[in-house]
């Protein structure tokens, strides 16, 4: 958490390293659009995937729902584009003074999307596994069903770990944003509280306490509200 501490410790004096006001508004709207795009892509993909793998004995019917599963997994993988590109666009917004924070956020997003990729790959592997289960029968089918459940659970674990990386990077980002008033301080404080709660929920989930969905709500609401602020007001040009 050294970067987080460094962000909080930085002085409030403003340098001229950030983009010009017009460019800053463009960057603000790009980041806002990427927040919404990533949220919608992953949410839609997750819903499609869950409609298939959430059914009992889903391997027996996976051939009939293959298109739905593959489309859902590909939508989930769109976060590789939206999340990493969003982190890249933050570099000119944060300027030279926030370069360490921007690098931390980018690194966290890269870790996050790699974990998303691993989870989605596991889901896609259930398609050939379903065909194997249909052809094998008997003990082979039972073995395939067990492996299918393991792949689905692996995606759930990868998701929680990805959210932990996201929470860490976002804490560093919005601690810096709070300090330099990148957005209104009350808004940035909402982000800090939301991501701390999200991080706690992800850790709890790994220990078997099914509370991450509830604890992700404050952070999710912030990520839904932030784009609208960025579209209308943008990042503070004096930060």
Image (cartoon, helix red, strand yellow):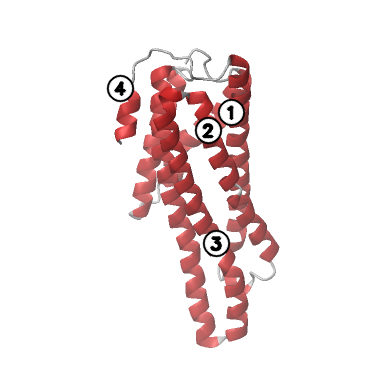
Residue 216 percent coordinates (x, y) = 45, 40
Nearer-the-camera pick, 231 or 18: 18
Mark 1 and mark 3 lie on one chain; the one further toward the N terminus is 3
Which residue is tagged 4? 9
Return the residue at label 2.
Answer: 223
The disc, 2 or 3, on the residue closer to the chain's N-terminal end is 3
What whole-number distance in Å separates the C-alpha atoms at marks 1 and 2? Answer: 7 Å
- Residue toward you, 21 or 117: 21
Q: Are marks 1 and 2 in contact (CB under 8 Å)?
A: yes
Q: Is residue 214 shown above or below 226?
A: below
Q: Choose the circle earlier in sequence order: 2 or 4.
A: 4
Residue at the disc numbered 3: 121
Q: Quadrant of residue 59?
A: bottom right
Which quadrant: the N terminus?
top left
Residue of label 1: 227
Helix, strand or loop at label 3? It is helix
The answer to whether residue 77 is seen in the rendering is: yes
| On screen, residue 157 above or below 166 | below
Determine the image quadrant of residue 98. top left
Instruction: Mark 3 or mark 4: name the one nearer the start of the chain.
Output: 4
Q: Residues within 10 Å of mark 2 (few under 14, many from 20)?
A: some
- Is the residue 213 above or below the residue 35 in the image? below
Counting other residues with Cα less than 10 Å from the Cα at mark 4, is it few (<14), some (14-19), or many (20 or more)?
few
Answer left or right for 216 relative to 124: left
Q: Is residue 128 above or below residue 44?
A: below
Depth check: give the residue in front, 14 or 137. 14
Q: Tell which tag, 2 or 3, sits nearer the viewer.
A: 3
Instruction: Report x, y in % for residue 170.
Output: 43, 35
């Amino acid at each position: 958490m050294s970067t987080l501490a460094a962000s909080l410790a930085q002085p409030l004096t403003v340098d001229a390293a950030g983009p010009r006001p017009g460019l800053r508004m463009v960057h603000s709207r790009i980041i806002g659009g990427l927040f919404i795009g990533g949220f919608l892509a992953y949410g839609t993909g997750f819903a499609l995937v869950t409609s298939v793998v959430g059914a009992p004995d889903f391997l027996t019917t996976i051939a009939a729902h293959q298109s739905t599963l593959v489309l859902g997994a590909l939508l989930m993988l769109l976060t590789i584009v939206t999340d990493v590109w969003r982190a890249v666009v933050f570099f000119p917004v944060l300027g030279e003074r926030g370069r360490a924070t921007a690098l931390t956020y980018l690194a966290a997003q890269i870790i996050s999307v790699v974990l998303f990729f691993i989870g989605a790959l596991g889901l896609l592997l259930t398609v050939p596994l379903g065909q194997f289960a249909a052809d094998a029968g008997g003990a082979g089918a039972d073995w395939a069903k067990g492996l299918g459940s393991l792949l689905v659970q692996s995606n759930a674990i990868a998701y929680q770990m990805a959210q932990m990386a996201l929470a860490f990077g976002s804490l560093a980002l919005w601690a810096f944003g709070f300090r330099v008033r990148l957005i209104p301080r009350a808004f940035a404080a909402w982000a800090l509280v939301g991501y701390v709660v999200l991080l706690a929920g992800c850790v709890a989930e790994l220990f078997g306490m099914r509370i991450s969905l509830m604890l992700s709500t404050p952070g999710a609401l912030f990520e839904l509200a932030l784009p609208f602020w960025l579209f209308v007001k943008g990042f503070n040009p004096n930060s």
